[in-house]
Image (tube, coloured by chain):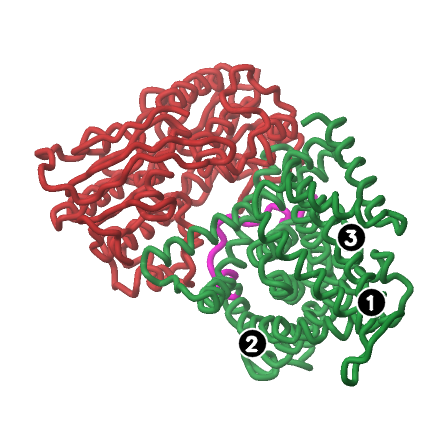
């Protein structure tokens, strides 16, 4: 792909996004954009259409109740309004058009080719490529582990059991992610590019967090990203935790849905999850949360609480982002309140799942890293050496 | 003109002794030794990827490679690592050449926009070889692994060019590049390579069968032939990118359906598959836990049992992966490049494991370019190029 093509496509996409977010864009144009996106999507049209219809029903019902407007009718203790329902439908249609257009564009443009075509500075391109290559490597590692279990008859059929089995692979995958980070560091050095001392953990945590989000993209608000970023902060400190959280969300948002404005909220929110992990690490180091083994009751309780809180805070941030972006909702505090309350109810189950994941993961991951650190190094870090006087 | 391109003084080897070595301009040095004898570690030290223990222990053109900035180090040495994919830095073939500032050969066989993740392991190695520029020290770690005949010719040409520009240091377990060596450095005692036994061709009834189909690999469709194989040792061959690994995945039931084992779909536990990059299948903290707590097997000696699986050399890791594959006496055993990284002793143990499984009535199918394995096969499934 030529740079001019890449920049032209990106500019056209941003202009289209801006037009779709403009309050004056008529509903028939939004409908046309949805239809165009459905036609252009290479696959998964049914899932996209079903998702859009569910979104429209949800927003229509929510705004009909929260900001009914006129005319309105009593429905037992509730008041339901046609004006609110229409606003909700239009907001959901706008969102569907925006997401659909970006998803279709990303599917055609291919993020890997786009990234190389925009010709960022060599170091930046190499770093982002290192993360994306590590994502691919880890996805392949996960598939190989899954295939090996499947051939041995150890891969369950039920979705819940399968998710539990996949989660049990988190500890070895975090260790493998570190190995992949070291391989990326060495490859860049061979290619003539040096890296900093935090390169390996940053690539490892970002890549696994991104791969974890892509793997669980079908489950709303349940993703390995939360726990990976939290553990990244815990194991490698605040800088790696925060930066990996931000980068993982930026990259996966771009890969999944193109340059949508939501990333401006999603990314820092996930960075905060990494900071929470780092804060826990500091507390443990100072003894405030240290209760002996890393899977002791205080640690597990803190990790579970962090998982539940992280889910709610992240979903609240995402809802606030949606409220800011959609002109049908923007500025209406009642609509914001409705979104946040609905988000709390909607995310209760994902929060519990994430909490359980945090609680289950923290011990095995810490033990796996301790075992890895105890082994003789096979590829010691050049960056860790003192320089010659 | 400086005669010594690289110098190694008192470099500690895993077995206890130390190594002194001077690599002179115009020579090709073959590092030979069993798995775990420190060949890859020495190449990594020469490449500036691992720090030496003592000052002046490793020098390339008079400088310590671990201390050099990467941009300057590139002018001193080129290194093609053991795992070809691990050496890539670009997301596409075009990006790979551009990031390194190396011109893409006009004869490069795959589309420049092809994404790196869709390259087969052999294609990734070909790409790694094409990226070698004119540095005076060329380091090649098992350069023939996964390469077809055309790729092997490229390696030989590259070694001749490397010798002309400076010097070449390489490893080659199978000894296929023995005639390229000006000097052999033995890092440990290694058994001579033996041929695999020739046996009477298998005649029994069909054990495993699958119909012809085609499978999508990245941007292209790969046709896969139908197979019907009896008990025995068989190989699948073909140029890089022909779909050998994909055929194994298909027979394992991981890419499409329609595979029958003894006339019915395979049940869990019927099939074992050895995948490339076996290290990524290790999930336990010790080798003993990986291989199921056995006190030791011919493939995995007792001395390795207490070690962390990710601390093993590639060859040792391959032995552990093979031990897991042959542990359960499955009727269908599929092996993707099983000889990769193995020393002579490991290859002999692999032959024992393969023919032991065949004697128990198993069908063993290996994807390989190795002429020794191909010569020992009962049947050869030949795939055409992409």
Residue name at image x 31 percent, y 26 percent: B176
Q: Residue A2, percent across and down?
A: 71, 25
Comes first in the chain, label 3 or label 2:
3
Residue name at image x 67 percent, y 31 percent: B71
Q: Chain of mark 1?
A: A
Q: Is residue A114 above or below residue A259?
A: above
Count every numbered label the image shows and give the total: 3
Q: Nearer the viewer, mark 3 or mark 2?
A: 3
**Other residues around mark 3 within 10 Å, as few (<14) / some (14–19) / many (≥20):** many
Q: Nearer the viewer, mark 3 or mark 1?
A: 1
Q: Is residue B80 above or below residue A17?
A: above
Magenta residues (range)? A370-389
Are marks 3 and 2 in one subunit?
A: yes
Comes first in the chain, label 3 or label 1:
1
Secondary element at image label 1: helix
Write down the quadrant of residue A223 in the picture. bottom right
Q: Is residue B186 above or below residue B301?
A: above
What is the distance, in whole Å, between disc 3 and disc 2 at their CAs?
Answer: 47 Å
- Give the residue number, with chain letter if any, for mark 3: A94
Chain for colour red: B
Q: Chain of mark 2?
A: A
Residue A82: give its label.
1
What is the distance, in whole Å, between disc 3 and disc 1 at their CAs?
Answer: 18 Å
Chain for colour green: A
């Amino acid at each position: 792909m030529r740079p001019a093509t890449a920049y032209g496509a990106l500019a056209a996409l941003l202009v289209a996004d801006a037009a779709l977010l403009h309050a004056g864009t008529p509903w028939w144009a939004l409908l046309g954009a949805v239809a165009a996106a459905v036609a252009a999507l290479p696959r998964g049209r049914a899932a996209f259409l079903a998702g859009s219809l569910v979104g429209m029903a949800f927003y229509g019902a929510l705004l009909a109740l929260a900001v009914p407007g006129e005319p309105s009718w009593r429905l037992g203790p509730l008041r339901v309004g046609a004006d609110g329902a229409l606003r909700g439908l239009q907001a959901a249609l706008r969102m569907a058009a925006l997401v659909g257009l970006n998803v279709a564009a990303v599917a055609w443009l291919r993020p890997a080719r786009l990234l190389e075509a925009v010709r960022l500075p060599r170091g930046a391109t190499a770093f982002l490529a290192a993360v994306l290559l590590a994502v691919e490597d880890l996805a392949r590692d996960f598939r190989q582990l899954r295939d090996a279990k499947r051939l041995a008859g150890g891969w369950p059929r039920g979705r819940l059991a399968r998710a539990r089995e996949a989660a049990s692979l988190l500890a070895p995958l975090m260790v493998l992610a570190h190995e992949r980070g070291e391989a990326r560091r060495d490859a860049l050095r061979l290619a003539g590019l040096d890296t900093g001392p935090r390169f390996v953990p940053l690539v490892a945590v970002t890549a696994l967090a991104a791969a974890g989000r892509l793997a669980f993209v079908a489950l709303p608000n349940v993703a390995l990203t939360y726990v990976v970023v939290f553990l990244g902060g815990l194991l490698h400190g605040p800088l790696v935790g925060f930066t990996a959280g931000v980068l993982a969300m930026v990259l996966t948002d771009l890969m999944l849905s193109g340059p949508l404005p939501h990333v401006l909220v999603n990314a820092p929110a996930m960075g905060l999850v990494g900071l929470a992990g780092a804060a826990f690490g500091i507390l443990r180091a100072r003894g405030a949360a240290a209760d002996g083994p890393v899977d002791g009751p205080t640690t597990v309780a803190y990790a579970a609480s962090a998982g539940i809180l992280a889910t709610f805070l992240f979903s609240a941030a995402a809802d606030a982002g949606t409220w800011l972006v959609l002109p049908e909702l923007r500025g209406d505090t009642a609509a914001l309140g409705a979104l946040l309350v609905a988000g709390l109810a909607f995310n209760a189950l994902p929060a519990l799942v994430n909490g359980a994941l945090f609680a289950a993961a923290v011990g095995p991951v810490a033990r796996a890293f301790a075992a890895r650190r105890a082994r003789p190094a096979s590829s010691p870090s050049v960056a860790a050496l003192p320089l010659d006087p | 003109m400086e005669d010594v391109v690289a110098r190694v003084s008192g470099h500690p080897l895993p077995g206890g002794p130390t190594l002194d070595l001077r690599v002179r301009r115009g020579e090709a040095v073959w590092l030979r030794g069993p798995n775990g004898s420190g060949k890859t570690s020495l190449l990594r030290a020469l490449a500036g990827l691992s720090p030496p223990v003592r000052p002046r222990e490793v020098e390339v053109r008079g400088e310590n490679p671990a201390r050099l900035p990467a941009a300057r180090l590139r002018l001193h040495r080129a290194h093609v690592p053991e795992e070809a994919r691990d050496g890539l830095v670009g997301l596409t073939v075009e990006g790979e050449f551009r990031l390194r500032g190396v011109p893409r050969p006009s004869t490069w066989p795959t589309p420049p926009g092809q994404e790196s993740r869709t390259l087969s392991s052999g294609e990734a190695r070909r790409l790694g070889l094409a990226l070698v520029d004119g540095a005076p020290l060329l380091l090649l770690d098992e350069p023939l692994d996964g390469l077809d005949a055309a790729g092997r010719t490229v390696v030989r040409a590259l070694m001749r060019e490397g010798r002309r520009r400076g010097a070449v240091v390489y490893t080659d377990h199978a000894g296929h590049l023995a005639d390229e060596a000006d000097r052999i450095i033995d890092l440990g005692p290694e058994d001579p390579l033996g041929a695999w036994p020739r046996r009477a061709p298998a005649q029994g009834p069909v054990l495993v069968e699958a119909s012809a189909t085609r499978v999508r690999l990245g941007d292209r469709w790969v046709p896969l032939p139908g197979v019907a194989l009896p008990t025995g040792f068989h190989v699948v061959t073909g140029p890089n990118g022909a779909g050998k690994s994909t055929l194994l995945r298909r027979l394992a039931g991981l890419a499409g359906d329609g595979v029958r084992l003894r006339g019915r779909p395979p049940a869990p536990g019927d099939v074992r598959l050895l995948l490339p990059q076996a290290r990524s299948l290790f999930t336990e903290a010790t080798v003993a836990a990986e291989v199921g707590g056995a006190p030791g097997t011919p493939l995995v000696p007792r001395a390795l049992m207490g070690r962390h699986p990710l601390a093993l050399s590639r060859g040792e890791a391959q032995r552990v992966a093979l031990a897991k594959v042959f542990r359960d006496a499955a009727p269908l055993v599929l092996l993707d490049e099983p000889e990769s990284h193995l020393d002579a002793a490991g290859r002999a143990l692999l032959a024992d494991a393969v023919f032991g499984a065949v004697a128990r009535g198993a069908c063993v199918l290996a994807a390989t370019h190795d002429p020794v394995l191909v010569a020992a096969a009962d049947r050869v499934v030949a795939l055409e190029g992409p």
